[in-house]
Amino acid sequence: MVRSLFHALVVTSLVGCGSGEVLLPVPGAETEADEEVGDGEAEGETEAEEDGDADEADGDGADGEGDAPVENDGTDSPDDGVTGAGIMLDPEPIGPSSDIVDVSGGDFQVGEAPASSGAAAVPVILGVTAPPAVTNGGSATLLITLAAPVEAPTFVVSLAGDSGFHTVAGTDSNGDGVYEIDVQVSGDAAQPSLVLSVAATDAAGNVGEYHEVTLELVQSGVGDVKITLSFDRTHDLDLHVFEPMGEEISFMNRASANGGQLDLDSGANCDATTGLSENVFWPRAQAPTGAYRVMVHNYAECSEGDIAYSVRIAHDDQIKTYRGTFASGSAGTVAEVATFTR
C-alpha cells in the first residue's frame, strides 16, 4: 500500500514530462542547485576538476557574480545530464580549499584563524547551535544569534585540524534575527567528530569571541555514485533513487541487484536519529551507466513548520548540491530533485 501510494504520487508529479523536458518539483517543494567541486569523493580520487559545464550553464564562465538561476525551458539540458527547475551553478573554486568542509558562499584561507581582538565594535554572538551530527557527504546549518541585528554580518568559521579557515556572510532567510551558515562535509571525511568555531567580525576586520560547536560524524558509504539527503531536524523525509534500468532504492528496497545500497535512513516514524541524513551509494565499479532519477518524499511531518533539506549528488568527479523546502502541511508530496547521467 505504501509503495503504491508513493508511485501514484510520482506519476502525478511527472505527468506531461517527456524526453528532454524539465521535471518540476511537486507544489510545496522548491529545489535549486549549486555547484560544489573540489573535495574529492572516494578513495583514490583527487580534487574534482570541472569539465566546463558550469561555465556553459551560467552563461559567462567568469566569477559567477550577479548570475541569475538558469531557467531551463526543457529544450536544452546541461551537458552533464542534470535537469531541474531553476538550477544555479557556482563556478569552480579558484585557489585553496578545505579537504574536509566547504562553507556555502564562503572564502577559504590557508593558515590559522585570526585571534579574537576584543574590539568593542565587533558584533556580539549570544550563541551558536548546530545539529548533533552530520554524515560524510551531508550538510549542516549553523544558527548564530547576535545580541543586536546586523546587516549582512561576516563570520569566521574554522574547523579543528583543518589547514585553514573560512570567512562568510551570514544570511537571515526567514527574518527571525538568527543567521544561518551552511556547512557541507566532504564525502571523504573520516574523523569521529567535527569541532567548529565561529566568530563575528566588523568592517575593520576585528574578530570577536569564538563560540564552539561539536558535530558527531556518522559514517556512510562512498563509491562510484553517492547521493546524500540532509535535513535540519527530526522529520520523516525519504530518499528515493531510480537506477537506469528502473529499479528503485529506498527504505522499501534497500539494496539493488546492481549493488546500490541505502545504508543510512533517518526519521522513520518520527523517531529521533543521530544523523538527520539518508544515503544511497554504489561501491566502486558497480554503479550502472545511464540515467538516474533522484526524489525526496515528504512522508510525514514530525513537527509544525517548513522543513529545509539538501541533496548532494556525487558521481564521476562531479558534485552538485540541491537545496529545497517542503512547506508546512505538505506531507505526502514528492520533490523531483534531479536526473543525471553517467
Image (tube, rainbow, N blue to C red):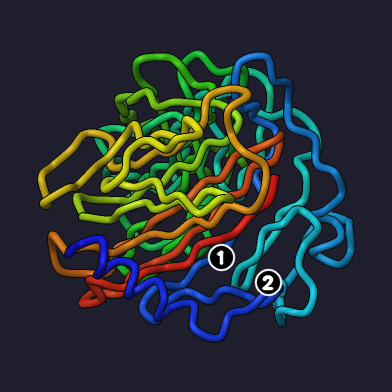
The quarter of the image holding the C terminus is top right
In the figure, is residue 57 to the left or right of 186? right
Depicted 142 relative to depicted 291: above or below: above
Q: Nearer the viewer, residue 256 or 58?
A: 256
Task: Look at the image and tell me whether residue 332 can be seen.
Answer: yes
Q: Could you tell me residue 279's position as x and y percent? A: 40, 38
In the figure, is residue 206 to the left or right of 125? right
Residue occupying image coordinates x 61% and y 40%: 205
Badge 2 crowding class, 10 Å Cα cut-off, few under 14, some 14 to 19, many 20 or more, is: some
Q: Nearer the viewer, residue 252 or 153?
A: 252
In the figure, is residue 280 to the left or right of 292? left
Instruction: Report the label total.
Output: 2
Residue occupying image coordinates x 61% and y 17%: 163
Amino acid of disc 2: Pro
> Badges 1 and 2: C-beta atoms under 8 Å apart?
yes
Badge 1 crowding class, 10 Å Cα cut-off, few under 14, some 14 to 19, many 20 or more, is: many
Q: Which residue is mark 1?
A: 32
Task: Find residue 69 and name its label.
Answer: 2
Residue occupying image coordinates x 34% and y 44%: 125
